């Protein structure tokens, strides 16, 4: 698998956040290779290697609380988390 250097640095950055804050506490994020749909040495969506954490927003990463897909797991995500903070950050940056 040919992974661009820029993306490799995104994978590296993803490794420093091993936990995710969910509605009832902080959970350890699931690493690539623990998913039942995992196949091959690299995640097919974010290219993380077996044992590495997925890049934020990866469609393969599973929610450690409910076992569903992390992205769009509204059941487990605190209601005030995410969207508004992201929008604010983008406005500040531009
Ligand atoms: Zn992934
Ligand atoms: Zn969940």
Image (cartoon, rainbow, N blue to C red):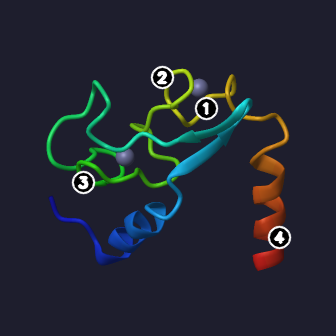
Q: CA distance from mark 3 to mark 2?
A: 20 Å
Q: Nearer the viewer, mark 4 or mark 2?
A: 2
Q: Residue at x 39, y 69 (%)?
A: 12
Question: Mark 1, mark 2: which one is toward the viewer?
Answer: 2
Instruction: Tell me: 10 left or right of 23.
Output: left
Q: Which residue is mark 2?
A: 67
Is 77 located above or below residue 53 in the figure? Answer: above
Q: Is residue 71 above or below residue 1?
A: above
Residue that numbered label 4 is attached to: 91
Query: Can see residue 93?
Result: yes
Which SS class for mark 2? loop
Q: Nearer the viewer, mark 1 or mark 3?
A: 3
At x 55%, y 21%, the residue is 66
Of the image marks 3 and 2, the number of the one nearer the N terminus: 3
Q: Residues within 10 Å of mark 2 (few under 14, many from 20)?
A: few
Name the residue: 51% across, 31% down.
64
**CB within 8 Å, label 4 to label 2:** no
Is 42 situated above or below 7?
A: above
Q: Which callout, 4 or 2, points at the residue further toward the start of the chain?
A: 2
Image quadrant where residue 61 sits: top left
Residue at image mark 3: 49
Query: In the rendered structure, which disc, 1 or 3, sits on the residue that comes first in sequence?
Result: 3
Q: CA distance from mark 4 to mark 1?
A: 23 Å
Q: Secondary structure at mark 1?
A: loop
Question: Given this view, does label 4 or label 3 mark the residue nearer the observer?
Answer: 3
Q: Which one is nearer the viewer's eye here, 74 or 35? A: 35
User: Within 10 angstroms of label 4, few (less than 14), some, or many (20 or more) residues?
Assistant: few
Figure quadrant of the N terminus: bottom left
Label 1 sits on residue? 72
């Amino acid at each position: 698998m040919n992974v661009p250097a820029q993306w490799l640095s995104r994978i590296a950055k993803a490794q420093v956040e091993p936990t995710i804050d969910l509605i009832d506490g902080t959970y350890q994020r699931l690493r690539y290779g623990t998913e039942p749909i995992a196949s091959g040495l690299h995640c097919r969506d974010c290219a993380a290697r077996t044992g590495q954490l997925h890049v934020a927003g990866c469609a393969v990463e599973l929610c450690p609380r409910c076992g569903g897909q992390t992205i769009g797991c509204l059941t487990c995500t605190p209601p005030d988390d995410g969207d508004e903070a992201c929008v604010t950050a983008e406005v500040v940056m531009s």
